[in-house]
Amino acid sequence: MPQSMDRSLIASTARARRVTREEIVNLKIKSEPKGIKSWFRGVGNVFKTIGHMFSVGPKVKPIVDCKVSGHVMPASGWPAGKLPQCVDCGKHINDATQLRNSVWKK
């Protein structure tokens, strides 16, 4: 802490005044929309809810076409005597030419 700091300024700060329940009720009444505004807000909330129901869904893994671009080799490599499975589609890889970026595919 710096030596030049005046401690009397910290001790003399005033505490914040507490907000009473009546003041909160008055603020709620004043800020609440009336008439046609409240009706439009209610209709808007209904459409917003319907939009959220249709837009939020489970996360889906993107579909990769292994026939066109080739299969993806698992990180564990190619075990001796076994056929590895593609990371994207789960099918067995029979030959190294079936791997992605191994050969040009038509």
Image (tube, rainbow, N blue to C red):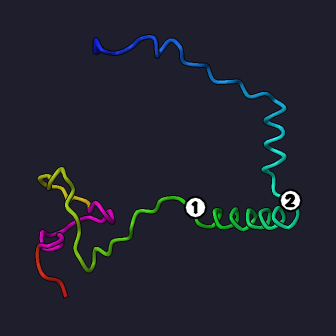
Q: Residue 53, located in which quarter of the rendered image? A: bottom right
Tell me the number on the disc at residue 56. 1
Residue lying at 13% horizontally and 82% vertically, measured from the top left:
104
Q: Is residue 42 above or below residue 65?
A: above
Image position, residue 10 (x, y; %) = 47, 15
Any magenta on residue 98?
yes
Q: Residue 66, located in which quarter of the rendered image? A: bottom left
Q: CA distance from mark 2 to mark 1?
A: 32 Å
The kind of residue tagged 2 is Lys
Please state, as top left, top right, bottom left or bottom right, where the N terminus lies in the image.
Answer: top left
The nearer-to-camera label among 2 and 1 is 2
Q: Is residue 10 left or right of residue 17?
A: left
Image position, residue 67 (x, y; %) = 27, 78
Label 1 CA crowd tier, 10 Å (few <14, some 14–19, many 20+): few
Q: Is residue 5 above or below residue 47?
A: above
* Boundaries of the magenta span: 86-101
Any magenta on residue 77?
no
Residue lying at 34% horizontally and 15% vertically, measured from the top left:
5
SS type, badge 2: loop
Q: Which residue is mark 2?
A: 34
- Which numbered disc, 2 or 1, marks the residue that appears first in the sequence? 2
Q: Is residue 56 above or below residue 66?
A: above
Residue sitting farthest toward the right:
35
**Predominant SS of the magenta segment:** loop
Please state, as top left, top right, bottom left or bottom right, where the C terminus lies in the image.
Answer: bottom left
Residue lying at 80% horizontally and 44% vertically, measured from the top left:
28
The kind of residue tagged 1 is Val
Tell me the number on the disc at residue 72. none
Q: Nearer the viewer, residue 40 or 74?
A: 40
Q: Is residue 1 left or right of residue 6?
A: left
